[in-house]
Image: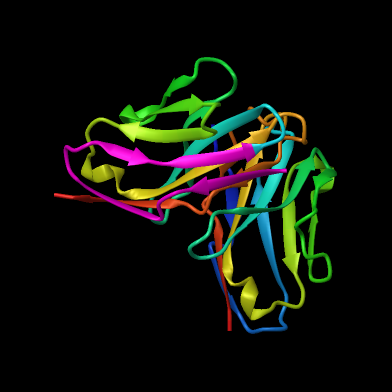
Amino acid sequence: AQSVTQLDSHVSVSEGTPVLLRCNYSSSYSPSLFWYVQHPNKGLQLLLKYTSAATLVKGINGFEAEFKKSETSFHLTKPSAHMSDAAEYFCVVSGSTNAGKSTFGDGTTLTVKP
Amino acid sequence: EAGVAQSPRYKIIEKRQSVAFWCNPISGHATLYWYQQILGQGPKLLIQFQNNGVVDDSQLPKDRFSAERLKGVDSTLKIQPAKLEDSAVYLCASSSRGTGEETQYFGPGTRLLVL
């Protein structure tokens, strides 16, 4: 069985300040982990993914995430928020040995204030 | 390359009516997924196809939902009869081989409102 918990349903930051979106996971397998972003009225888009290579993963638009097995976490960070980062973010866990089934978290809404 | 296409984009029906959604995945992608996203929640996998075979449909309410993927390309998801709680966005996604490491590419979704 696998599950994902996004620890904050809403995060609000000021433009130019750091972003931290928290994600904890549970998996019986060696997991792959993803962050997807969903802008209003747009489809889900991959930000970055971890697939058992380097534990610090860099993605698009300056985002990065670190896989910490001991803490079962995969938190998403960005050094400086931009107005265009305002969106819904989903953490996803996927198992390599269960037909690749993906489990999504309930999402974190990021608001960026000017 | 063209992305995942879905239609219609919006649908309003009354409860007990039927509705169908269509999805055309990225060309050459063997794996196709249907997700249900209820407002305020993350997408929930309804069914996963590998070519035209079903890999996982454990969360598909089979008494009212059905899906098919003829010839391993396009797919149709049907609800009959619809209930109020089926109001959601239905997302279609595809990936190359369906392994857990792959990126899934999502369509724009179909927003369903059941009155």
Q: Report the span colored magenta.
A: A1-26
B30 sits to left or right of B89: right
Q: Residue furthest left?
A: A114
Mostly what secondary structure, the magenta segment? strand
Name the residue: 62% across, 39% down: A26
Q: Position of residue A44 (x, y in %)?
A: 49, 45
For this rendering, which residue is in front, A19 or A43?
A19
How many marks do you count on the picture? 0
Residue A22: in magenta span: yes
Which quarter of the image is occupied by the C terminus of chain B?
Answer: bottom right
Q: Position of residue B84 (x, y in %)?
A: 63, 80
Residue B26 visible from this viewpoint: no
Task: Judge whether B27 appears above or below A89 on screen.
Answer: above
For residue B102, what is the image quadrant?
Answer: top right
Task: Judge whether B7 appears above or below A105 on screen.
Answer: below
For this rendering, which residue is in front, B20 or B56?
B56
Residue B111: in magenta span: no
Name the residue: 78% across, 43% down: B49
Name the residue: 33% across, 39% down: A20
Residue B22 visible from this viewpoint: yes
Name the residue: 65% across, 42% down: A102
For this rendering, which residue is in front, B61 or B105?
B61
Which quarter of the image is occupied by the N terminus of chain B?
Answer: top right
Q: Residue furthest top?
A: A54
Q: How is the image coloured?
A: rainbow
